[in-house]
Image (cartoon, helix red, strand yellow):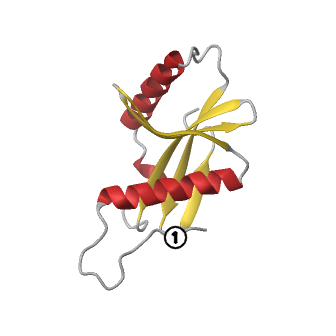
Amino acid sequence: MAQIPTWTGRPRQLTTKQVGNAVELRARRWLEEQGLKFIAANVHERSGEIDLIMRDAAVTVFVEVRYRKSAAYGGAAASVTRSKQHKLLQTARLWLARHNGSFDTVDCRFDVLAFTGNEIEWLQNAFS
């Protein structure tokens, strides 16, 4: 499994964006190892962003990737709030519309892939 990169021998830390990019790449690779197929990453719509869009057989999977160094303030999965869920639903609705689909015509689900330290938690169909 790919590790989150660190700059050894350098006085500065990775930026939040660099850590986020590394975690999302690790998430993509991990999900591909589980048999999912990659569709898109970092999809931006006016209502927000979807980290990964994958395909699991005939199901389109919208994936929120979360990372926390430790569980000291709750695990990474706990950081997906109702507000974030609502934004993801709206963003997915817009993305589907741009691709000639809707929640009525496309079989889809929302997953959370949470990295807390070195632990991986995959919450399939996390918003139902």
Residue 2 lies, in percent from the top left, at: 56, 68
Q: How many marks?
A: 1
Residue ID at (67%, 24%): 107
Residue 29 sits above or below residue 105 on the image: below
Q: Residue at x 28, y 81 (%)?
A: 10
Q: Residue at x 67, y 36 (%)?
A: 55
Q: Is residue 95 visible?
A: yes
Residue 118 higher or lower than 94, as above or below: below
Q: Quadrant of the N terminus?
A: bottom right
Q: Nearer the viewer, residue 70 or 94?
A: 94
Mark 1, residue position: 3
Vertical side of 64 occupied by 90: above or below = above
Q: Check the image and name the residue furthest to the bottom.
A: 9
Residue drawn at the location 39% of the way across and 56% of the way down = 20
* Image quarter of residue 119: bottom right
| Left or right of 123 on screen, residue 69 | left
The answer to whether residue 75 is seen in the rendering is no
Q: Is residue 70 left or right of residue 29?
A: left
Residue 89: % across, % down: 47, 27
- Quadrant position of the C terminus in the picture: top right
For the residue pair 15 and 83, the one nearer the viewer reads as 15
Label 1: state its secondary structure: loop
Q: Is residue 105 left or right of residue 74?
A: right
- How far from the left and from the top, in percent, is residue 81? 40, 41
| Percent position of residue 105, x then y | 65, 14
The crowd level at tag 1 (other Cα within 10 Å; few <14, some 14-19, many 20+) is few
Name the kind of residue labelled 1 in the image. Answer: Gln
